[in-house]
Amino acid sequence: MKNNTLKKFLFQVYRIITYPLRVLFWIITYPYKILRKVVYIFTTEPEDRPFSDVLASFANTNVRKNFWEQIFTLRFHLIRALFVFAICCLVSFFYLADIFNFLQTPLNNLTNSGLRISGPGDIFDIIPKVIFAGGAVLTMPYFFFEIYLYVVPGLKTVERKIGLILQVFFFIFLVTAIAVSYYLILPISLSSAISLTSRFGVYDWELSRYLSFVSVNLFL
């Protein structure tokens, strides 16, 4: 009994002493593992089976087990995406003032009128929305990349390459669409809104409604 306790103690000491070395080894070999996985993805072809055979194979216990393994794999990808979303929300929180300035710049370029906050509790409703919206925008490319990683084992080599290219084009399209909306569409929309409001009344816009208007113009 004492020998077993001593062995366990020495093993724990060994793991503690060698922990930095194991971390260093993991860091050094991680790029190689990623490269090997990329090579495997783009050089292996999935098994091509008719849909009727797939349905018939569900009677097999192993196939049903594999189906639930795929569900768990999807959950793993979604958890990683949620983890990145949490990090992006944290980044948005630290740059909250810059985000507010960024969203209000198109209005400040057109008028010196400020935005009104109706009540003391409104700001506590606005801040989380801005943080979550910023986190969602930053996470969006990675989220679709995780979906791509999930479906890529079932794609053919050509389809995998096309999917990867589409990921790059999606990111470029997202950045371009936001830039065009921010620098072109949003100023025109705000200018028209100010002009029409001044003609029929006095504009005294609320911050929450302004942010909703900006969000619609940027992302829809």
Image: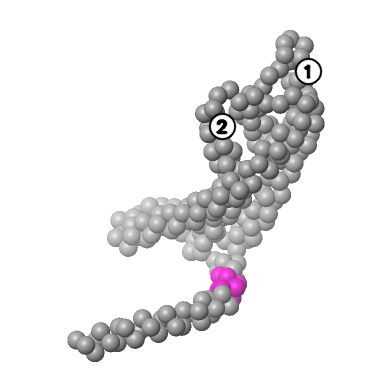
Of all residues, the one furthest to the front in this rendering is 120
Which dot marks residue 123?
2
In the rendering, at what x and y percent does residue 202 appear?
A: 72, 14
Nearest the viewer among 121 and 104 is 121
Q: Which residues are magenta?
A: 29-37
Q: Amino acid at mark 2?
A: Ile
x 79%, y 25%: residue: 111
Residue under label 1, please give it. 195
| Magenta span includes 34 | yes
> Is any atom of residue 118 visible in this view?
yes
Horizontal arrangement in the rendering, residue 71 relative to residue 209 (left or right): left
Which dot marks residue 26?
none
Looking at the rendered structure, the secondary structure element under dot 1 is helix
> Is any atom of residue 74 visible in this view?
no
Q: Amino acid at mark 1?
A: Ser
Q: CA distance from mark 1 to mark 2?
A: 27 Å
Looking at the rendered structure, the secondary structure element under dot 2 is helix
Nearer to us of marks 1 and 2 is: 2
Number of marks present in the image shown? 2
In the rendering, at what x and y percent does residue 11 appear?
A: 35, 84
